[in-house]
Image: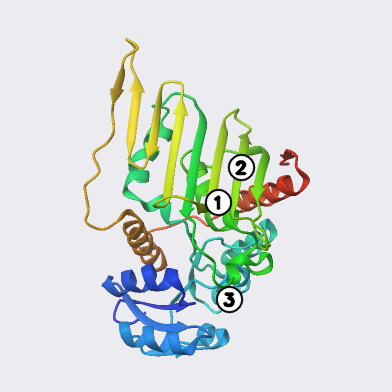
Amino acid sequence: MSEGKLRVALMGVGAIAQVVHLPVLNELDEVELTAVCDIDHVRANALAARFGIPHIFRDDADVFKSDLIDAIIICTPSYLHEEQAIAAMEAGKHVLVEKPLALTPGAVERVIAAAERTGRTLMVAMNNRYRPDTVALRPFARNGELGDVFLTRGAWLNRKMRVVRPTWRHRRETAGGGAMMDLGVQTLDLCLWMFGFPEAASVTTHMHYPEGMEVEDTAGILVRLKNGAGISLTVSWSLVAEGDRHYMRMLGTRGSGAIAPLAVFKEVETGNMIDVTPNVPVSRENLYKASYRQELTHFVRVATGEVEEPLPREQIQIMRIVEAAYRSAEEKREVALE
């Protein structure tokens, strides 16, 4: 660390790095943006100049061996996450990986094993856990205030955009899948996180593959939980509407909770319904950027030893469900989880 600051490098300077990571990190007093690494040297140079970042790398190995870096944020294509995260931690760096942590349950296990072996910080960027509204809603789910929650519905529907030229996200080999891997992983994580990650029993999935595309643009998933409850997910890159949709609703025997907007209703002894929606301070910053600001701030505190964070073992369960979802869609049947 330099002058009490965490020296951070970004690997991959695509959209998520440009829109969120770099602007937010640049505003954190505890962070020194030290380096960027990308095979697109022109873009990396432009962003380094914009944010005053002194070091630019094109080769991963140079990032890992640099003594100028304490922590690495990995924003590269998904198929690279496992190898890069393990190499970074073995080089002594703390790591935050954009979702998914890795493409298979076994790969996630290997990344977590590397974190255990090296003692380095490992986090995966599930930023929805840090939204002010989801943080306010979670206690109602965890404390039984809604009764027995028997169904949770989550959706992330992105407005349809014309694909001029396919990218790594549109190839199964580099992305691991389409909308399910891109949007479904985070949506599933949020629904399970609300309840402390209960075990799943089975998965049933329908996926839509547009003509000429090797990954799905839409998926509908039903996850049956061992506790008798269910999770219904819908994710899509192809919503024909004026804007994106991102929501979650929990249905319980004595109440319901939802985002967005945040709303919580409970049934009292008289049978009447009361609105118990908590007040969340209004911020000029949108929920998306606010969630990343909280997440990145937390990562810095964990990496500097100020607070502790358990290793993301729940991502093994997430990827087991995702793996079963693709199998269910391919085989057109319900798939049981062991």
**In the displayed structure, does residue 207 sit left or right of residue 193?**
right
Q: Is residue 117 visible?
A: no
Disc 3 or disc 1, which is closer to the eye?
1
Q: In the rendered image, which residue does mark 1 sit on?
A: 184
For the residue carrying disc 1, how many other residues have a C-alpha within 10 Å: few (<14), some (14-19), or many (20+)?
A: many
Please name the amino acid that badge 1 sits on.
Gly
Q: Residue type at mark 3?
A: Glu
As drawn, 257 above or below 174: above
Per the image, the residue denoted by label 2 is 221
Q: Please, what secondary structure does the residue beneath circle 1 have?
A: helix
Horizontal side of residue 283 vs 225, given as left or right: left
For badge 2, the amino acid type reads Ile
Mark positioned earlier in the residue sequence (2 or 3): 3
Residue pointed to by mark 3: 90
User: Is tag 3's residue or tag 1's residue first in the polypeptide sequence?
Assistant: 3
Residue drawn at point x = 67 percent, y = 56 percent: 105
CA–CA distance between discs 3 and 1?
30 Å
Disc ID at residue 45 = none
Seen as rendered, the residue at the extreme top is 270
Mark with earlier residue (1, 2): 1
Q: Residue at x 39, y 36 (%)?
A: 258
The quarter in which the N terminus is drawn is bottom left
